[in-house]
Amino acid sequence: MLWSKTKQILREPAFLHEDKACGRVIHYHEAVREALQQAMRQNRRVFIMGQGVDDPDGMFGATKDLHLEFGRERVFDTPLSENALTGVSIGAALAGMRPIYFHNRPDFLLLAMDQLVNHAAKWSYMFGGAKNVPLVVWACIGRGWGGAAQHSQALQGLFMHVPGLKLVMPATCYDAKGLMLSAIADQNPVLIIDHRLNFNNKGFVPPEGYTVPIGKGVIRRKGSDVTVVAVSHLVIEAIEAAQEAAAQGIEAEVIDPRTFKPLDENIILKSVAKTGRLIIADCGWKTGGITAEIGAMVAEKGFAYLKAPVKRIACPDLPTPAASSLEEAYYAGKKDIEKAILEIAR
């Protein structure tokens, strides 16, 4: 039931997009795939590895049939040995290649923590910038299909903690392509955490190659009463919640950080200075997560702006349930954001 419900989402409000002139609307997975295809055509050092990247479904469509165009030397399946294969990808990056390591789920990144945290994230620092690891690691958060406790963990708060590792979480089709191309061009490791619900969406995406800057957020909806900072697919839900609140005379400003390491602190602080109220909505756990970090940053650097305590919307500190009915209660969404907007504004 929940899956059929999410399949109806197939929308992104047109005003979200930086480039509507192209007039071309494509699916989210097509935007990611197009970025990969264009990068591989432009640079022979770019290659893709990961479990299932050459399957018929091609990682939810993001890598579909790329092995047919570029061959299995540049798009290939990997064994169930995440730590070792991450070490291989780091070695390839150090040798001048530009690997993109795809994971179905962030849960599997826990098996590669030694390589990601102790090696990939630290090489540039330890060698004074003389050596770099231009590695992209991609993983997808899931819900609505019964992934449960070991296949649904949103671990962005954990990876935001690691110096030297950039963290990207797109919300729109436009950004999915532009941020992927920016990540591939970056000289240091970039972790992209996507959300499965994003793959239901369509949006404006120019056919040519373009980049979206890492570390630069964007205001998705202007408002004067409340600032809502939303993560990944919750950006669209926050906009919908803001539209509902507007019918009651409350104007919420919705900010999409797009990247969380580095975080665009300035865009958040300027908004809070205007509204005096802050809500942070994340699809990960509450304790020690993105909501905690952004809330602490605003308390530290913008406390004088606040007219009310910061509100945080996130998953409870519990393992993810499998049943769709329990998932519905577990995950935060539009209704939670709307309720928080109305409460904080009063």
Image: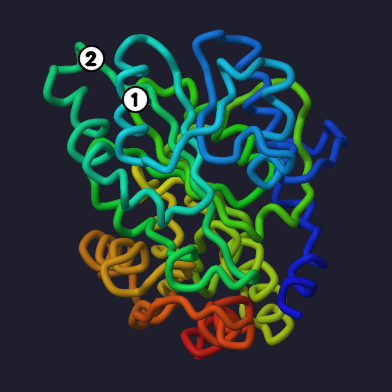
In the rendered view, tell whether residue 23 sits above or below residue 71: below
The residue under label 2 is which amino acid type? Lys
Identify the residue at horizontal 48%, vertical 29% (top origin).
Answer: 100
Pick whichever, 118 or 257, lies toward us.
118
The residue under label 1 is which amino acid type? Val
Instruction: Count residues near mark 2 (Cα–Cα under 10 Å), then give few for <14, some for 14-19, many for 20+.
Output: some
Mark 1–mark 2 Cα distance, whole angstroms, equals 16 Å
Identify the residue at horizontal 35%, vertical 74% (top origin).
Answer: 286
Query: Is 319 on the left or on the right of 32, as rendered?
Result: left
Which quadrant of the figure has residue 288? bottom left
Identify the residue at horizontal 71%, vertical 29% (top origin).
Answer: 34
**Residue at the disc numbered 1:** 88
SS for dot 2: loop
Q: Position of residue 64 (x, y in %)?
A: 72, 34
Q: Position of residue 55 (x, y in %)?
A: 67, 38
**Residue at the disc numbered 2:** 131
SS for dot 1: helix
Mark 1 or mark 2: name the one nearer the start of the chain.
1
**Res. 258 visible in picture:** no
Q: Position of residue 175 (x, y in %)?
A: 61, 40
Query: Is 189 on the left or on the right of 183, as rendered?
Result: left
Identify the residue at horizontal 83%, vertical 31% (top origin).
Answer: 22
Q: Position of residue 297 (x, y in %)?
A: 26, 60
In the rendered view, tell whether residue 297 sits above or below residue 131: below
Which quadrant of the figure has residue 156? bottom left
Residue lying farthest front? 79
Instruction: Count residues near mark 1 (Cα–Cα under 10 Å), then give few for <14, some for 14-19, many for 20+.
Output: some
Pick whichever, 316 or 302, lies toward us.
316
**Res. 172 visible in picture:** yes
Mark 1 and mark 2 residues within 8 Å of each other at the beta carbon: no
Query: Is 26 on the left or on the right of 3, as rendered?
Result: right
Pick whichever, 57 or 225, lies toward us.
57
